[in-house]
Image (spheres, helix red, strand yellow):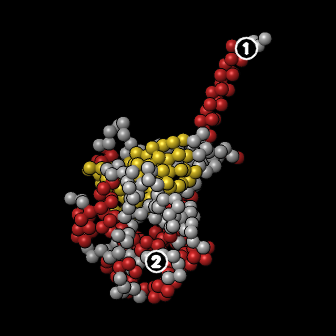
Amino acid sequence: LRVQTEGTVGKTNELLAQKRKLLGLIGPKVFKDPVLADPATKEAIEITSTAALLGSGNAASAVSFDVRSPSNKFRGSSDTYLDLLQPVGSDSSSTSNGETASSSPLTNIMRQAIPYIPPNLRGPLSSLTEDEFIPMRDLFTSPAVSFAYERGWRQNFATAGFPGPDAESQMAMDYFAPVVARVPSNETSVMVDMSCATGLFTRRFALSEKYGRVLGCDYSPSMLTEARRRIDSDPRLSRKRGRRGSNVTPVSTSLDLVRLDVGQIPMQTESVDCMHAGAAMHCWPDLDAAASEIYRVLKPGGRYFATTFLSGYFATLSAMDGQAGTAPSRQAFQYFESIDTLRDLLVRGGFA
């Protein structure tokens, strides 16, 4: 004979509720993303996450993501980023540390060394790797450059007239404000920081809590790895509970990092409210493809805010570096002759 008092019944129910909650934490979660998409087909993707295992310090371990569209499969991790550059299994798909899965260790070392080789010697060395080194695209894939980016590299942009990250992020948010104000209360505003590098602006946009979702996007695995490290070091942004103090309230904004190619953006058409690209456009190899893709993913009335260099600045640098007269694909950066050049580029992409 088993007799339960009211107190023991309550305790049993409480334990069952806790068990269900725990099972919910360790079971797979399936999420149909309303923004992200297959980069090639633009089909919506479904993200399945594995369980977060509880470790010491009440901090959750990394959660891996299985990302699928009807046509392709991708991968990601909560400790790094969602890799939507190329499907899993493609010849040049990369690992989370930026190495190409099918490359030898020597090839990966050579690829990382190329940015430090004089321009006239890069051609022969590039021929020994599995793909061509394109300076404006591949320079920032170097872990050394990613490490230096917020440790002096980006601060030097002030000499070219850039206002600094605090002022620029505020300028962008002021420009985006009318768009965000029109987002219905039952919808989530989506802000994209394109070519986010180490998340210098991404973090500021997320901390402002002006947007429901912020996506920090970049081509470089090493930049995104550094961005994740910096995000996790801020208790207001970190997903790791052990990093938060008892008095720290996490931001309400959802923040994700995505590896992608701006010329083939893995986002659904008309899914983004606003996009920022800080000191980035001069690093994009295919400008027309990028402009068209940015226009495609922005919602009607969405806004794009960008800063970049004009040609006078880089003409001096290229002459000093011995690159004057080289073909565009071999230059370290794109050259924009004037603001009209930038305006014409965006008009060709679809902007009015």
Mark 2 Cα-neighbour bin, 10 Å: few <14, some 14–19, many ≥20: some
Task: Give residue 193's position: percent from left, percent from top.
Answer: 41, 57
Disc assigned to residue 139 = none
Residue drawn at point x = 69 percent, y = 21 percent: 11
Disc assigned to residue 4 = 1
Inspect this view and state whether residue 161 appears: no
Q: Secondary structure at mark 1?
A: loop
Residue drawn at point x = 41 percent, y = 52 percent: 37
Quadrant of the rendering where the C terminus is positioned: bottom left
Q: Is residue 32 above or below residue 291?
A: above
Q: Residue furthest left?
A: 352
Q: Secondary structure at mark 2?
A: loop
Residue drawn at point x = 39 percent, y = 51 percent: 43
Task: Give residue 292's position: percent from left, percent from top.
Answer: 30, 61
Mark 1 Cα-neighbour bin, 10 Å: few <14, some 14–19, many ≥20: few
Question: Disc 1 to disc 2, how far (Cα)?
Answer: 74 Å
The image quarter in which residue 241 lies: top right
Quadrant of the rendering where the N terminus is positioned: top right
Q: Is residue 108 above or below residue 264?
A: below
Whether residues under marks 1 and 2 lie with C-beta atoms below 8 angstroms apart, the answer is: no
To which residue does mark 2 refer?
Answer: 132
Front residue of 164 and 301: 301
